[in-house]
Image: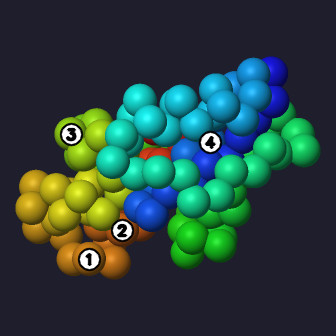
Amino acid sequence: MPLFEIETESHIIITWADNEDAAKAVVFDSYPKEPPVRITRRPRDTWVISKAALGISGKTDPCHVARDCLAKAAGDKVHAIRLYMQQTGADLERSRKAIESNMVMGW
C-alpha cells in the first residue's frame, strides 16, 4: 500500500492508502474543515524526519504529558503546544520541542 503525504492549511498527514482518493478520505475523516492543499505519493513506504532539523538533540524519551496534550489536541501541534505550556509551565521553545519530538517518535 502506498504512503501519502497530505498537506492542509494546518497539518501534514502521513498515511497509507490504496490511492489518492482514499488518502483524501483520511483527511476529510480527521479534519473535515481542512481541504488538502497538496497530496504527494511518497516513493518509498517509510517516512523519516531529522530530529536535528527540528532542533532536537540528545536522548528523546517519550513524554507522557506531551503525548497526552497531543491526544487532547487531536494531533493539532499548535494547540498541543499551548496545552503543554499550561500543564507544565514550560516556555514556548521548550514546549515546542517537547511536542515536536514526541510527534517524531510516532505519536
Residue named by callout 3: 72
Which label sits in the foreground, 4 or 3?
4
Q: Are marks 4 and 2 in contact (CB under 8 Å)?
A: no
Earlier sequence position, callout 1 versus callout 3: 3
Residue at mark 2 to residue at mark 1: CA–CA distance: 6 Å
Q: Tag 1: residue type?
A: Leu
Earlier sequence position, callout 4 versus callout 1: 4
Give the number of the disc on residue 92: 1
Image quadrant assignment for residue 10: bottom left
Residue named by callout 2: 96
Which label sits in the foreground, 4 or 2?
4
Q: Secondary structure at mark 3?
A: helix
Locate the N terminus and report the quarter of the image it occupies: top right
Work out whether residue 32 or residue 70 is closer to the camera in this orientation and state it: 32
Give the number of the disc on residue 14: 4
Q: Are marks 3 and 2 in contact (CB under 8 Å)?
A: no
Earlier sequence position, callout 3 versus callout 2: 3
Earlier sequence position, callout 4 versus callout 2: 4
Q: Residue at x 64, y 26 (%)?
A: 22
Give the number of the disc on residue 59: none
> Residue 104, how many percent across, how many down?
55, 50
Earlier sequence position, callout 4 versus callout 3: 4
Work out whether residue 10 or residue 28 is closer to the camera in this orientation and state it: 28
Residue 58 lies, with reference to residue 39, above or below; the image says below
Work out whether residue 11 or residue 105 is closer to the camera in this orientation and state it: 11
Crowding at label 1, few (<14), some or many (≥20) Cα neighbours within 10 Å?
A: few
Crowding at label 4, few (<14), some or many (≥20) Cα neighbours within 10 Å?
A: many
Residue at mark 3 to residue at mark 2: CA–CA distance: 16 Å
Side of 41 relative to 103 (left or right): right
Residue furthest right as drawn: 43
